[in-house]
Image (cartoon, rainbow, N blue to C red):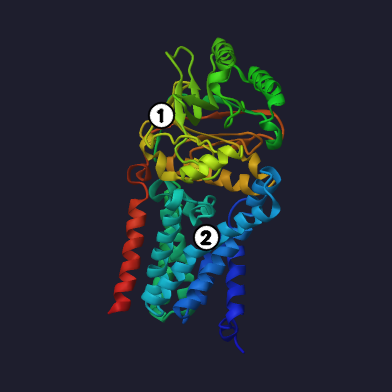
Amino acid sequence: MNLREAVERRYVGHAVAFVAGVSFSLSFAPIGWWPLAILTPAVLMWLWEGAAPKRAAWLGFWFAAGTFAAGTYWLYISLKLIGGAPMPLALLLMISLVAIMGLYHWVLGWVVAKYFPARGALRWMVAIPGAWLLVEWFRSWFLSGFGWLAIGYSQTDTWLGSLAPAVGQFGIALLALVCSGALLTLGLGTKRERIVAGIAIVAIWSAGYLAGRVTWTQPFGRPITVAVIQGAIPQDEKWLTENLKSTMALYEERSREAYGSDLVVWPESAIPALFNDLVPYFDDVYREASLHGSALVLGAIREDRGLYYNSVLALEPGAQGPGWYDKHHLVPFAEFFPVPQFVRDWLRLMNLPYADFTRGAANQETLAAASQRIAASVCYEDAYGSSQLHALERATLLVNVTNDAWFGHSTARYQHLQISRLRAMEADKPLIRAANNGVSAAIDADGHVLVTAPEYEANVMRATVQPRTGRTPYAYTGNWPSVCLALVFGLFGAYVRRR
């Protein structure tokens, strides 16, 4: 029995697809074996060869299930160990997410077998990459979206990553998938197809190499000094009422160590209470920072006319008032509850959480601090690259405030850091990342991590960054060129199959 015959057995093929999916997850931080992001999709494309639609669908399902079972295992930590959910419920929710992610590739596999050419370079290098990219893009926004473990993020440290300012995350993903198809073509294609595949691989990687030598934006003023206050409050202690005063004192005292820096940044909801109830405290912090010439950017929860917002507050010495950014992409069942009113009434009777945060506007003004215009994001909002395009025209600096303590000592924080790095690369502007217990980091315009704070300990992280002005090609066009090209690829493959 040869290898082809072995994998065509029902459970053997599914097992190979699952292992390939698990291996795909290793291409992301912190492991960072990026070649797997090109090799493992080629394996799945090979498994799809000659498969009927139903079998191809299940092969796709098990590939994605392996990816998310291994790559997002930290959801169990968040739900059970941090959130306190019963173990059966935590496992059910995690398995449900894995199954939902698997369904996207279930559909992809069915479409590949049903509508695309049976074999050849057009199938491997055009049709499948286009359809795969469309599924990944759809997953990034449908039902609020879950863009984690998207192929583009795996290439932050490669020549393909240098194309981020030109084509963005999805453009990188499409090129990586074309390379995956080209690998399969080199193994199974005709002589002419192999020549085309080789040329495609060389051309794509050469373009990435050359893109890394292009300067897309310009320096804005002098370099500025930044200090990030990492409180390192354990998540299970953060919201205890008896710890509020000690948390306030910690941030106040640590900030005194940082004053004199141009910009001082606190993480998401640094003080676990409503801003409205602590205005005198924040006034004192602002007054002391102003005496030392420091501007403040703070993660804070606020109430406005009965509505609650997860926000970022900017306080600039001499400014007429505070500037606010309100989080737009909220986390379902954590920051808002998509349930009907009668369920909310029941939750109220049971003394369970039922209040929502309110979604901020889609297009908000940049924040003014330290003589900069800041494009702010809260927590996993930076996984939505296109949501900040409107701000990149004016922004000279990006700031993300977050709290990855929800995921314990897991790989989630490093995956999130990798996402932040790609956002800096797309904008070609530096990004400051303030986290409750790590990874707090300063990232330059090329996506290189300049400095990180020691994880899981209270710390003042200092860095010097060069703000930049201007817009990259991606900042002008967003994801639409890549998505439209992927659609053309998929439709062309289906057209050829129909003929």
**Residue 49 position in % (x across, y down):** 47, 79
Q: Is residue 406 above or below residue 247?
A: below
Quick one: 381 or 158, which is closer to the camera?
A: 381
**Residue 76 position in % (x across, y down):** 66, 51
> In the rendered image, which residue does mark 1 sit on?
366
Q: Which quadrant does the C terminus fall into? A: bottom left
> In the rendered image, which residue does mark 2 sit on?
100
Q: Is residue 171 above or below residue 320?
A: below
Furthest residue in direction bottom, as rendered: 1
Q: Which quadrant does the N terminus fall into? A: bottom right
Identify which amino acid the numbered label 1 is placed on: Thr
Q: Secondary structure at mark 2?
A: helix
Residue 114, located in which quarter of the rendered image?
bottom left
Q: How many numbered marks have been drawn onto this rendered protein structure?
A: 2
Identify which amino acid the numbered label 2 is placed on: Ile
Q: Earlier in the sequence, mark 2 or mark 1?
A: 2
Label pair 2/1, CB-CB below 8 angstroms: no
Query: Is residue 26 something that shows in the picture?
Result: no
Q: Nearer the viewer, mark 2 or mark 1?
A: 2
Q: Residues within 10 Å of mark 1 (few under 14, many from 20)?
A: many
Furthest residue in direction left, as rendered: 499
Query: Is residue 332 something that shows in the picture?
Result: yes
Q: Is residue 52 above or below residue 305?
A: below
Residue 442, located in which quarter of the rendered image?
top right
Q: Residue at x 60, y 69 (%)?
A: 18
Quick one: 161 or 94, which is closer to the camera?
A: 94
Q: Is residue 155 above or below residue 464?
A: below
Q: Secondary structure at mark 1?
A: loop
